Amino acid sequence: MLDGMSIRKQVLYDAHTGTMRGFVDIGMGVDETTEASEALVFMVVGLKSHWKMPVAFYFIKSVSPDTQKILVLHALEALHERGIKVVCVTMDGHISNMSMCAMLGCQLKLNQPLKTYFTHPSSGENVYIIMDPCHMLKLARNMLEAYSSIISPAGTVRWQHISELNNVQEREGLHAANKVTRKHVNFSSQKMKVSLAAQTLSRSVALALTMLKEAGYQQFEDCSPTVEFVQVLYVLDNTYKM
């Protein structure tokens, strides 16, 4: 898996090596004068056993999809030389990652036949791409809130149904067996908190919306597409945990 993490900008003198540390460094022997603000970390995680190990990190400010592709292929080659078989690469849904996947040979656009793998540079076997479920769940929640409504095969999915669920619970002093509160609806200050997204797009919320519709609440009479959308995301998010 690979992911970026923010780091504090700081340049320090390394007395051991006689060099300045804190600049951009992607391991290609090029002296940079730009201060790094992120660390791009590569980690190997056991597929059928409980272990994980960081294998590489690069100090970056930003990295192009093409450069990131080179780093991924280099990591795969180095791991193959050491007898480690990589069957998938997990990352978040950032646009640069999506572009890198396309450069590797994947096809993830709606107007293309889906291809979620690329060829290992050393073994020739398929290496599959998995987008981090937690990050994708947050993106789905953010998209629905930002656009207010989206069109699905089942109909119009509306953020208003989630908002109204909270309103009804606050107004009537009940909680229909779900965890939705005001902080789930107004989440802008906690966008990175996975638990809020998971509790918003959960099976309990789908059941609560269905119950309110069946109870005759007018604001939920058209909530069936929203219920289906939430149920599908709940199943997808929990499949990887099985």
Image: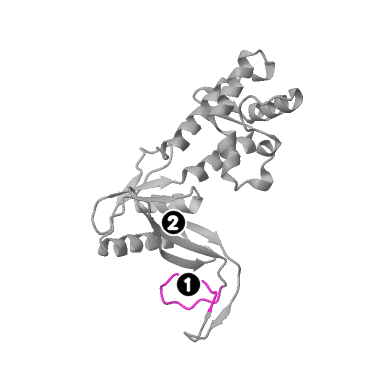
Report the residue marked by disc 1.
25
Residue 76: name its quadrant.
bottom left
Q: Is residue 157 magenta?
A: no
Say if 88 sits above or below 84 in the image: above
Q: Is residue 32 magenta?
A: yes
Residue 221 visible in the picture: no
Residue 224: name its quadrant.
top right
Q: Secondary structure at mark 1?
A: loop
Q: Which residues are magenta?
A: 21-34
The answer to whether 122 appears left or right of 73 in the picture is: left
Give me the residue at 50% from left, 32% from top.
Answer: 234
Judged from this view, the residue extending furthest toward the left is 123
Marker disc for residue 2? 2
Marks 2 and 1 sit apart, C-alpha to C-alpha, by 17 Å
* Mark closer to the chain start, 2 or 1: 2
| Residue 191: x %, y % from top left | 62, 46
Q: Magenta: predominant secondary structure element?
A: loop
Whether tag 2 and tag 1 are in contact, CB under 8 A, the answer is no
Say if 154 sits above or below 121 in the image: above
Q: Secondary structure at mark 2?
A: strand
| Residue 229: x %, y % from top left | 52, 28
| Residue 123: x %, y % from top left | 23, 56
Of residues 111 and 67, the one nearer the viewer is 67
The answer to whether 87 appears left or right of 211 in the picture is: left
Judged from this view, the residue extending furthest toward the front is 50
Which image quarter holds the N terminus? bottom left
Which image quarter holds the C terminus? top left
| Disc 2 residue type (three-letter) | Leu
The answer to whether 22 appears left or right of 74 in the picture is: right
Give me the residue at 36% from left, 39% from top.
Answer: 114
Give me the residue at 68% from left, 16% from top.
Answer: 217
| Disc 1 residue type (three-letter) | Asp
